[in-house]
Amino acid sequence: MAKNIAILGSTGSIGTQALEVTDKLNGKIKVTAISGGKNTNLLLEQAKKYNPKYVCVQSKDDAQILQNKLSGTKVLFGDEGLNVIASLNEIDLVLVALSGKTGLKPTITAIQNKKDIALANKETLVMAGDIVMRLAKENNVKILPVDSEHSAIFQCITNREAVKHLIITSSGGPFRTSSREEMEKADLSEALAHPRWKMGKKITVDSATLMNKGLEVIEAHHLFNFKYEDIKVIVHPQSYIHSAVEYNDGSIIAQIGNPSMHIPIQYALTYPERCEGVETESFNFIKASKFEFYKPDLDKFPALALAIDAGKKGGTYPVCMNAANEEAVFAFLENKIKFLQIYEITKKIYDSYTGIQNPSIDEILSEDEKVRTQTKELINKMRNL
């Protein structure tokens, strides 16, 4: 019997690759619902190909346009539409591939409706990890990580109590060997030229600052219930080892494979089964030739340390750090600020912030909005100097 899934964010990088995965699984996965924000042209193509029962877009006007073009499919819109999809009785698993805080509420709704989650949205755990993991436990819901690093750790942990350390690998991004001076002059095209992975623009810029790795440490803390002190980050430029776990007997188990998001996406969708899918070429150790490892340079990439500090402080400190960084990245993507100013702005906002411990979801969203407003004001002020 096919597993019925909803893909929230089907027009993005993860969403489109997830659909490619379903194409190769010989009917094991049924795409019952999809959502796609503003990219209505691609969403319409997907709806015609996969014939889902439900489609969700961002605006009411777009929903009406799509509804007129789709028969037999119910078209929803906005946050309410996402929550309707997350509540559907016929859905077995929800792939949350939405970007930003948009993914938080539908994830919680899906958990409360006892749907397993394939999680590709970092903000959900960065902003509200304590709440999300508690709800998942209360509702006996699986949180299946889609990030390649967390999927690797998930696959390597066979005995949680015997694990000593989690080891998260990082490619080092496009500026791994660059000088501070070169980074000062870096333009958008250089920041987006990731050496190993093809991803969305925001996450690619985060990879260039190593903020992305800091967010992954926070995620790993929540997903696997490990202290921050027991989570290590190691730079591995080849990106063949996607992450590893160290056991208390000295053994290290790593997940190795070609840099492809199809593999962790497929594992989350088919878990606990493993199936032949998109990636049919075996990993070639001889061709790979060498595996290199380096310590992260925190002087050059201070965003990693900032994110970990926010995680340790807990409460709404990760909310502040994430919101300030995201707004700064958006400004960089619009050529409003320089690359190194992303961290400078994030740090300035973070240093002036007073957090809330044990926040509610409403408080988390309120703090997020407050920090975004402050960050935008700071960016505008800097531009006008």
Image: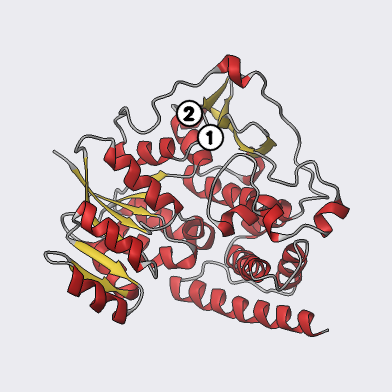
Rendered location of residue 319, percent (x, y): 58, 66
Mark 1: which amino acid?
Pro
Q: Label 1: which residue?
A: 259
* Residue 118 relative to residue 184: left or right: left
In the picture, the quarter occupied by the N terminus is top left
In the picture as drawn, the residue positioned furthest to the top comes out as 286
* Residue 139 relative to residue 190: left or right: left
Q: Residue at x 57, y 42 (%)?
A: 197
In the picture, the quarter occupied by the C terminus is bottom right
Quarter assignment of residue 3: top left
Q: Residue at x 19, y 61 (%)?
A: 88
Q: Secondary structure at mark 2?
A: helix
In the picture as drawn, the residue positioned furthest to the right comes out as 181
Mark 2: which amino acid?
Cys
Rendered location of residue 79, percent (x, y): 34, 73
The answer to whether marks 1 and 2 mark residues whose Cβ atoms lie closer than 8 Å is: no
The residue lying toward the viewer, choosing from 48 and 89, is 48
The residue lying toward the viewer, choosing from 356 and 182, is 182
Q: Label 2: which residue?
A: 156
Rendered location of residue 95, percent (x, y): 34, 52
Q: Return the disc, 1 or 2, that comes first in the chain's sequence.
A: 2
Q: Say if 60 sits above or below 46 in the image.
A: below
